[in-house]
């Protein structure tokens, strides 16, 4: 399947601390079929020498005779413990379960499909002409503009403060307040492919009376797909993929807090 970015809507914790794991060709003994109302069809309780029995999808089982079978491919029944709001990359779907990798991590395992939903990127729109920094922080932290603005104002950060229009530190402070980490410096833009998974981008860069000005946007890459969240209210679409038109000057790498 094409990798999909999903978000957790219902937490999941594995009940099997010792999941069955085997290589291609491993001998299997096939037992009972899973019975339940979850819609998890074609899972079989299997055993292999030296391990506890575990649930195996029919697609992995090559029947020989009776209960004897062998593995068509390498497999692990490892499940991934997840919390509501976490972002996952699903790379395989089998019988009501997704094989998922936690975003920004190498941790992977099976998660029930019913516990997940497709993550459709949504962009927070800035409510002030000079509010792109606040909106960018809101987009990264998953907060509405009004809430992010209130947080900013309580920190002494105001969109209309002209001294911030050529400043990068205030967005770092906003992100840190929400648990995200921003790189300490700005890195010159070279290509879209070389950007990190998440970054603040400076586009529409120009100078006025010797001062630098720019417009903040957010770059995201998930499951190999790139897009930009641009909070400008005049755009026909705030989810942008017209990369040639944006011409970033530099970027700040960002890491979201773990759920």
Image: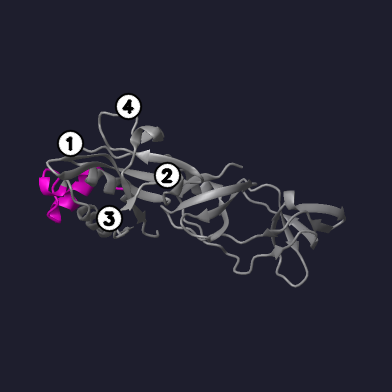
User: Mark number for residue 191?
Assistant: 2
* Image-based side of 221 in relation to 101, left or right: left
Q: Residues within 10 Å of mark 1 (few under 14, many from 20)?
A: few
Q: Between disc 3 and disc 4, whose residue precedes?
A: 3
Count numbered badges in the picture. Answer: 4
Q: Which residues are magenta?
A: 142-164
* Image-based side of 34 in relation to 255, left or right: right
- Residue under label 3, please give it: 175
The Cα–Cα distance between marks 1 and 3, rounded to whole angstroms, is 20 Å
* Image-based side of 171 in relation to 259, left or right: left
**In this rendering, which labeled residue sits more in front, label 3 or label 2?**
2
Tell me whether circle 1 and circle 3 mark residues in contact (CB < 8 Å). Answer: no
The secondary element bearing badge 1 is classed as loop
Locate the C terminus and report the quarter of the image it occupies. Answer: bottom left
- Residue, x 81% and y 58% (percent of image)? 70
Q: Between disc 3 and disc 2, whose residue precedes?
A: 3
**In this rendering, which labeled residue sits more in front, label 4 or label 2?**
2
Q: Residues within 10 Å of mark 3 (few under 14, many from 20)?
A: many
| Colouring chosen for the image of the structure | one colour
Examine the structure image and report whether residue 42 is included in the region drawn in magenta: no
User: Mark number for residue 236?
Assistant: 4
């Amino acid at each position: 399947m094409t990798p999909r970015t999903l978000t957790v809507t219902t937490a999941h914790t594995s009940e099997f601390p010792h999941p069955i794991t085997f290589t291609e060709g491993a001998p299997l003994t096939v037992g009972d079929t899973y019975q339940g109302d979850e819609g998890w069809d074609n899972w079989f309780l299997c055993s292999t020498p030296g391990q506890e029995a575990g649930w195996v999808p029919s697609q992995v089982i090559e029947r020989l005779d009776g209960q004897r079978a062998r593995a068509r491919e390498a497999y692990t029944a490892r499940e991934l413990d997840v919390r509501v709001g976490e972002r996952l990359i699903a790379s395989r779907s089998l019988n009501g379960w997704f094989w998922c990798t936690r975003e920004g991590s190498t941790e992977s395992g099976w998660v029930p499909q019913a516990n997940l939903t497709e993550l459709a990127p949504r962009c927070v729109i800035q409510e002030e002409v000079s509010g792109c920094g606040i909106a960018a922080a809101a987009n990264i932290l998953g907060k509405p503009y009004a809430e992010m603005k209130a947080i900013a104002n309580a920190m002494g950060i105001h969109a209309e403060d002209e001294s911030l229009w050529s400043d990068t530190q205030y967005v770092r402070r906003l992100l840190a307040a929400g648990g995200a980490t921003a790189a300490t410096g700005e890195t010159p833009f070279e290509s879209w492919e070389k950007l990190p998974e998440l970054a603040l981008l400076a586009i529409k860069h120009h100078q006025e009376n010797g001062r630098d000005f720019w417009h903040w946007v957010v770059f995201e890459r998930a499951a190999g797909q790139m897009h930009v969240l641009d909070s400008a209210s005049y755009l026909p679409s705030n989810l942008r993929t017209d990369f040639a038109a944006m011409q970033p000057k530099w970027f700040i790498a960002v890491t979201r807090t773990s759920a």
